Image (spheres, rainbow, N blue to C red):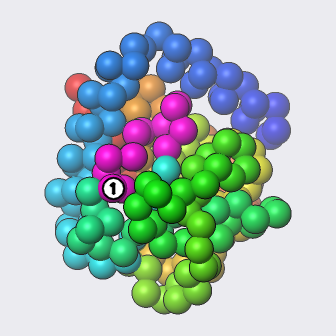
Amino acid sequence: MKEQKKQLRKQIREKKSLHSDSTLTAWSDETLRRLEAHPAFCRAKVVVAYYSLPDEVCTHQFVERWARQKTILLPAIVGNELELRRYTGAHSLRTGAYGIPEPAGETFQAYHEIDLIIIPGVAFDRAGRRLGRGKGYYDRILPQLNAYKIGVCFPFQLVEEVPTEEFDARMDEIIQYNF
């Protein structure tokens, strides 16, 4: 199973390298427009999002824009766990584990208030299976959250089948740019 996951991660990296930054930006913008029109997002008051890495659907402007209207929570890596912290502006971000900008401040504990979780991944399939980067951070926190889970990805990240194990959390829905 580990070898299958490793191979799929490599295939997705290779596919990403075939696309320009401007194409990926355009795909990110359209994917996020589709997300913003989704009923679950429109209803949500408290949203877990992510501050994207270069190979993910770019969320920086999305997070900034929606933090004025909704409570936006971003993950912060603490040891082997993800903590959720409120995004209060780019000024509050610090470089965390793996070079990812993370919000400083208190951990958000009111998990029952979270309405929606927007999740990146290396690959997804139509059954909602997700391949992450291999550290299991999301797989450990998602069982604690009773909110709708939407995975967002580029078209080349949606594959026929993602190899999974019993602890791999599934998405309720996947949103991607459609040609």
Q: Position of residue 88 (x, y in %)?
A: 42, 68
Tell me the residue at 52%/32% (across/down): 54
Q: Is residue 97 left or right of residue 100?
A: right
Q: Considering the numbered disc 1 on the image, is that residue within a helix, a strand or a loop?
A: helix
Range of magenta residues: 52-64
Q: Is residue 107 left or right of residue 63?
A: right
Tell me the residue at 40%/19% (across/down): 21
Quadrant of the snapshot with the N terminus: top right
Q: Residue furthest top?
A: 18
Q: Position of residue 42 (x, y in %)?
A: 20, 69
Q: Is residue 78 left or right of residue 100?
A: right
Residue 135 to residue 158: above or below: below
Three-letter code for the amino acid on which mark 1 is drawn? Glu
Of the pair 29 and 90, the residue shown nearer to us = 90
Q: Residue furthest left?
A: 37
Q: Quadrant of residue 12?
A: top right
- Crowdedness near tag 1: few (<14), some (14–19) or many (≥20) residues, C-alpha within 10 Å: some
Quadrant of the snapshot with the C terminus: top left
**According to the image, label 1 marks what residue?**
64
Residue 127 to residue 79: above or below: above
Residue 6 to residue 137: above or below: above
Q: Position of residue 124 (x, y in %)?
A: 51, 42
Q: Position of residue 8 (x, y in %)?
A: 66, 28
Q: Quadrant of residue 162?
A: top right
- Residue 139 visible from this viewpoint: no
Tell me the residue at 39%/14% (across/down): 20
Q: Is residue 141 left or right of residue 53?
A: right
Of the pair 112 and 95, the residue shown nearer to us = 95
